[in-house]
Image (tube, rainbow, N blue to C red):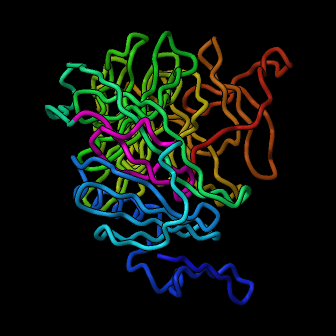
Amino acid sequence: MKMSIQKTDGNNIKIIDGVSYDEWFGRESESAREFGEILTEYSNTLRGQWITSISGDSSQGFCNLFFEKNGLSIWFNREGRCKMRLGGQDTFGRKENFMAGCRGIFGKALLAVYPGGRNGSRTAVFLFGDKMTGDYCQGSGVKKTSTAQALRISYSNKESKLLFSIEPVEIVNGAYVVLSSEKVPMTRGSYKQRLRNISNGVTWECIADEAGNVKVPAKYRYVHLADYTREIYQVSVVGKNGELKVGACDSEGRELIPCEYKDLYCLKVGYALVMDKNNHFWVLDYNNDAIFGPSIYGVDIYGNTDKYLFYTEDNREAGVECLGIYEVSTKTKTAPAVYTYIKYRDDGFFDVKYGGSNGKRAVVDRYGNEQDLMLSPGNFRGRGQKGKYNR
């Protein structure tokens, strides 16, 4: 079949065999999420089939992948769009043969198709290997690793052509692809692994040791270090409505705070500040017990004592949000929110600065009573800005 390629209107509108980019394909993703859903659908159809040939037109961003029973056409647009069509073996535009550069995948079965681009860029990854055996079990502790070959296809605007690359990837427990593994900073031998369940295309993250043994299981969508002094991780799952819900766990995967909050921040004194579904703030300990809350403002995240919290409230007289003193043991606001700066002293008192036009510095007890101390630079330690957690 003779192929004809044209451009019209100077807008890089491509035509092959008299059919334009917009006319030929029925499916085009409007978002990175939809792109992944389409690839998952094609993955379910093509799984287990061997690839027989790859051809197309590199400069036009077009390629055909032929399998035992189906053909898959991919057409990349210069504006970053990507259309796909799943059909029979009679697709069009056979100009270049890409088999020479892709021989590493022939003779292997297709395991999955999934997106591989970053920041929403359109990149399709075809994973080939031996047919899957067994199912992935989250948190099973069983690690059976095999190697597969990943064919990565994308379009480079800079080079004006399709890009093909084949690279080995690890498959854990027969259905889990290790996409990346990187050392977690400020930890002793902890590594964050980004994984994809190739049966459904869902991406997860976990924490493993240097030997690859999983410590924090891959049941969380995202995992990141929130408190390096205790190696506490903020973890998140996807709720019923697609929203992320966060919690916390320790370095061995023990859940400290369940994933039911909109946001979470670890305080350096050993508590966590969370935001609930009503946008109210709470301070929890790592047994999930409430220390403070609910509050619409939160607390000072730079507090340096576990005996007191510095809560935040709107002070109309001062015209700014101010800090007050909250005693953890009695769960009581002992001093009103009238300060723009508070620092706990080693002698049990507090260095403070008042808000508003007053703006004076003082030393107070936990009830806000000023102490008769000489306010020298030695007594009033630290003149940094106050920090608070606001939304």
Is 62 left, or right, of 320 in this rendering?
left
The answer to which image quadrant residue 28 occupies is: bottom left
Is 17 left, or right, of 354 in this rendering?
left
**Of 234 and 116, which appears nearest the observer?**
116
**Of 260 and 320, which appears nearest the observer?**
260
Q: Position of residue 389 (x, y in %)?
A: 57, 44
What residue is at 15 percent from the left and 32 percent from the top? 133
Magenta-tinted stretch: 101-130
Which quarter of the image is occupied by the C terminus? bottom right
Query: How many numbered marks have been drawn onto this rendered protein structure?
Result: 0
What residue is at 67 percent from the left and 41 percent from the top? 339
Residue 115 in the magenta stretch? The answer is yes
Q: Is residue 178 above or below residue 95?
A: above
Is 391 left, or right, of 88 in this rendering?
right
**Of 358 and 260, which appears nearest the observer?**
260
What residue is at 55 percent from the left and 27 percent from the top? 366
Q: Position of residue 73 (x, y in %)?
A: 41, 66
